[in-house]
Image (tube, rainbow, N blue to C red):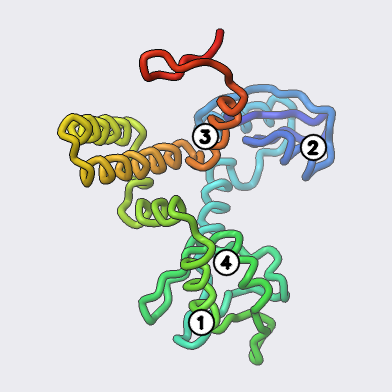
Amino acid sequence: MYYIYYIKNIKVGCTKNLKQRVENEQGYNNYIILDKTNCINKATELEILWQNIFNFKNDFIPYKKLINLNKKKMEQQQNSYYDSGHTTTFINSNNENLNGYMFPKQLKLKDGNVIELNELIIDYIKKTNHKSQFSDERFIYNKNLINYYLRYEDEDKTIYDNIRIWAKQKGIYDSGDCKTQYIKLMEEAGELAQAILKNDEAEFIDAIGDIVVVLTNLAKLKNYKIEDCIVSAYNVIKTREGEMINGTFVKNK
């Protein structure tokens, strides 16, 4: 949602996050919401309209164009690294902790290695980077990072992490959706039913595994982790009381 806001005698502006933009960044708690819309084009028009009504000068760069420029700048920053083959330098980084540097989602190295970046890997980079002898920019040694990443893959990643990495590489999160994954879940449940009826142990194990994979991806598509879903369910059932009736646990009402 885009909000057109008015700070009395100060300005008319547009933002998607009033608290962050107006209160935290600009320091104003008293403001009026003049309009709101889900359309960025409409928001741009409304901001200009209300600026004219309150006799404020129109912004030099219209809101939509400014957002696109900021987005393009962020995309450029997120790809600003240089791999020499031996080291990777983070362009325009100028402090030891890499404060302000917009890390990309991954580093694609010349030797073919792809380093998927998460909080743990980024924290390691922040602790092990060095200052370039030619500038204030920071760099890391590729071999050191790859060794750590491989250890992290072996020791720190859960099976769910590996499923999510596999699904990301296959494009499931970029091109798939909850509906297709739900249909896939029903297919796998059908295979599980067949395995039970046929007393096929191998197929039973395979179907259970496939169902867990699909559920992991289904949760991720809604920005959840299956681990958190399992914990949430367990916290509900762990104190539940009931009895077994005809082979099924029936909770007390």
Q: Residues within 10 Å of mark 4 (few under 14, many from 20)?
A: some
The residue that disc 2 covers is 23
Indicate whether 100 appears above or below 92. above
User: Does residue 110 appear to the left or right of 200 in the view shown?
Assistant: right
Closer to the observer: label 3 or label 1? 1
Point out the image quarter for the C terminus: top right
Query: Residue at label 3?
Result: 40
The tag earlier along the polypeptide, 3 or 4, is: 3
Q: CA distance from mark 3 to mark 2?
A: 22 Å
Dot placed on the residue nearer the N-terminal end, 1 or 2: 2
Q: Residue at x 57, y 18 (%)?
A: 241
Give the residue furthest to the top. Answer: 253
Which numbered marker is on residue 142? 1
State the residue in front, 41 or 36.
36
Q: Which residue sits at x=22%, y=30%?
A: 193
- Indicate which disc, 1 or 4, sits on the residue closer to the N terminus: 4
Asked whether the residues under the numbered discs 3 and 2 touch, taking CB atoms below 8 Å apart as contact, a structural biologist would say no
Amino acid of disc 4: Ile
Could you give the CA–CA distance between mark 1 and mark 2, rounded to whole angstroms?
Answer: 42 Å
60 or 238, nearer to the observer: 238
Question: At which x and y percent is residue 60?
Answer: 64, 47
Q: Nearer the viewer, mark 3 or mark 4?
A: 4
The residue shown at (63%, 31%) is 47
